[in-house]
Image (cartoon, rainbow, N blue to C red):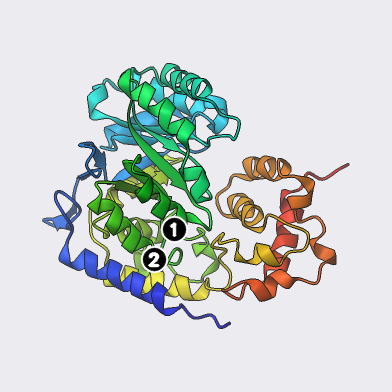
Amino acid sequence: MGKTVDRRSFLKLGAASAGAAIGCRGGEIDGTVDGAPMRMQYRQLGSTGLEVSAVSFGAHGIDNATLMKASLEAGINTFCTSGGYLDGREESALGDAIARSGVPRDKIVILTGDDIKQHATVDSLLENFDASLRRLRTEYIDVYYNAMVQTPNDVRCDVLFEAFEKARTAGKVRFLGMSGHHGGMQECLEAGIEAGHYQLFFTKYDFVSYPDQDQILSRAADRGIGTMVFKTNAGNRQKEIKDLEAGGLSFRQATIRWALSNPYVASVTVSLTSFNQIDEAVAAAGSSLSSAEVAMLRRYAGEMYDKYCRFCATCEGSCSREVAVADVMRFAMYFTYYGREKEAMRMYGELPASATAEECRDCSGNCDDACPFGRHVRAGLIEAHERLSFKKA
């Protein structure tokens, strides 16, 4: 399969540039004023009544209260964290930042959640809610989300629905969301609409994956379900393409603007690890996507077509050894392109031995033929195993 962007990917970029040209709903991004970038803008999150900043702070792997406080001062009022990240230190750092900022609690939107284990009970989930409240030093959570959903069965979680309703009645939680970034996300979103319990979709959203996602988000909006997105940069591999950001372009800013050009996207969640990145993200939310940025994203999509793993798991059915290809490639992405080496190695080490890529070197590579995007899957798995494995002395 050649290195060309398929028709649906081009259409997706075309829709984004059109959205930027015609403007968006309500108080959303619409350009600059007197040549200067606009301040942070805020959008309605579905029918929740919450106003979220167009860029939100993604705290995955970040427990820096000073950065969180600086983000608040820059106008970012929305924070996405999880009790399962860094053993709760993210939530504790956020609670500290909010207390130090002096910003009224009702001006801040907090999302937190965790993946719901198979053995979870109503009581165990209620304990998780209370633990998050203690770490966050708050009386209520704005949105609690069902994290890491991979199948519609994960979405239809009766034990969560029951626990959430009890917590909501007690005033501890306001709204329920669901989150994921796996290959079956389109089916999960459809199941989330049908379930009737969710007020927020918190999902991966980029310009090359999930071709039917825009239509699903439109239907969700019709039901009052708001959408926040993350991982908009399609693998974060811009440094591999020579002169991609020539002329002062910023790939990261372009992907934020691209996502915000969709009227159904309320906020783009970005991992902010420095003060410069805070400034960059706020500036990205202050102007519309340009034609030069659209061209840059088209070029990236074309050159990364057979390199970027969408984590669709299509090839996994061809693997006689049941390697968890999507997970392995996701961990490799964290290691190589996100600077999260230790975390990636830890997650890889937690996979069952049979699901790792340890034996891929001796395999014929049926996964290569099964990849719908023509990726060299086996070679990528071998490289991933070498990087992610703990070397024995």
Residue at position x 28%, y 70% in the image:
15
Quadrant of the snapshot with the C terminus: top right
Q: Nearer the viewer, residue 111 or 149?
A: 149
Give SS at disc 1: helix
Residue at position x 44%, y 63% in the image:
210
Q: Amino acid at mark 2?
A: Asp
Q: Position of residue 96 (x, y in %)?
A: 40, 20
Q: Amino acid at mark 1?
A: Gln
Residue at position x 46%, y 77% in the image:
5
Q: Is residue 186 above or below residue 110?
A: below
Gap between marks 2 and 1, in whole Å? 7 Å
Q: Which residue is mark 2?
A: 212
Asked if the residues shown at circle 2 and circle 1 are in contact, with their CB atoms under 8 angstroms apart, the answer is yes
Q: Residues within 10 Å of mark 2 (few under 14, many from 20)?
A: few
Task: Inspect this view and state whether residue 67 appears.
Answer: no
Q: Position of residue 151 (x, y in %)?
A: 52, 50
Q: Is residue 295 above or below residue 284?
A: below
Left or right, 178 with reference to 227: right
